[in-house]
Image: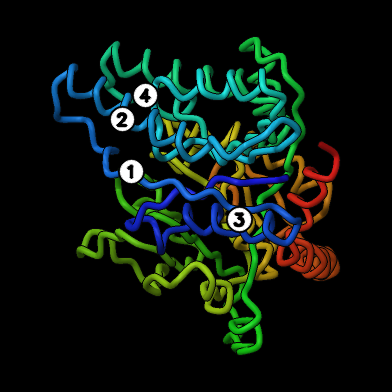
Amino acid sequence: MKYFVVEKLSKLEKTAWSKARNDVQEILISEGYHPIEIFTNLNNRSNISLIRKLKAHFEVKKIWEEKLSILKPGDSIFFQFPVIHNSIFLHNILKKLKLKGIKIITLIHDMESIRLIPEEKLSILQKIRIKVEEFGFLKASSFLITPNKCMREFLEVKDIKIQMGDLEIFDYLISKEIDEKKLEKPIFKKNSIVIAGNLSREKSAYVYSLPTNLDFELYGVNYDKNKESQSKNINYNGSYMADELPFFLNGKYGLVWDGTSIETCEGGYGKYLMYNNPHKASLYLVSEIPIIIWEKAALANFIIENKIGVTINSLNEINEKLEKITEEEYDIMKKNTILYSKKLREGFYLKKVIKNI
């Protein structure tokens, strides 16, 4: 039998983060996998004593053991990583499952050890815990689905010696009900650029220093709309459900950028683009919008090789870069995004990689 883990956490229902996970679950069901649901109320352990933290980790371990006890030799179990209901003991459970002849497949969405540890002011204990939970879990897996080649090579350097396969890009499913609405988009402005995602100053500080010689269309949560943030070339469109957002994006290009600066992608979130697959890239493609992406991003080669966008080193380069693109070149990118939109809507990339496991 083939199973997958469904981790329940009510506060994640409307985010892009939950959209990616929910799409994976839907694709797995279509491929014959069966759900095993996990829920605990022991996730917030930041303000409790060390003894209570260890007790919580042990309680979570018991829940996992009970839920995974249905697995038999020859079965497969599919995890999405990072695990929401984690425990420092979880990797030991996985090791026991492997010894029983159960295949453990892990799809990596994010790695905190890359994104948080270099930049955040974490305690030594927190850094050790993240590394133990992450690398212990990944090493205990049978097969890893990595977002891209860059993440895979990073793990290989970290002595992860199990079989791996690259996802390439995250799929983005659109429900039939929403797709049938066929919402008509307004005509975009010349060279207008979409920025979608978490627009907080902490996550996307660059948004508040955008070049003034381009039009930007912003979509997402946590946008600071004070007077200092307002500019005639910036239009904030609010936030939408992840399933409906593709029908509201209005722009000629979609920007994949992160961090604190417009000169380069820096800071923890900025540099993380060198390893992850930002879900907004999939959002733009499913919306049939060509992409502008940082040239050092892990997805940059995918964008260029498939002729679905352009790369830049600095946001100040955008205007000059776009002025050099002919109508014919843009039409090629646009037509290619239509092809990739269809693939992402059908779950092509996850289906492809799991068929090779």
- x and y, in percent, of residue 288 in the image: 70, 70
Q: Earlier in the sequence, mark 3 or mark 4?
A: 3
Q: Secondary structure at mark 4?
A: loop
Q: Residue at x 74, y 56 (%)?
A: 32
Q: Which residue is mark 3?
A: 25
- x and y, in percent, of residue 346 in the image: 75, 65
Neighbor class of circle 3 (other Cα within 10 Å; few <14, some 14-19, many 20+) is: many
Quadrant housing the C terminus: top right
Q: Secondary structure at mark 1?
A: loop
Q: Earlier in the sequence, mark 2 or mark 3?
A: 3
Distance from Cα at disc 3 to Cα at disc 1: 19 Å
Query: Does 305 sit left or right of 14 as displayed?
Result: right
As drawn, 281 above or below 298 = below
Three-letter amino acid code at the position of disc 2: Glu
Neighbor class of circle 2 (other Cα within 10 Å; few <14, some 14-19, many 20+) is: some
Label at residue 40: 1
As drawn, 305 above or below 345 = above
Q: Which residue is mark 4?
A: 119
Q: Earlier in the sequence, mark 1 or mark 4?
A: 1
Asked if the residues shown at circle 3 and circle 4 are in contact, with their CB atoms under 8 angstroms apart, the answer is no
Label at residue 59: 2
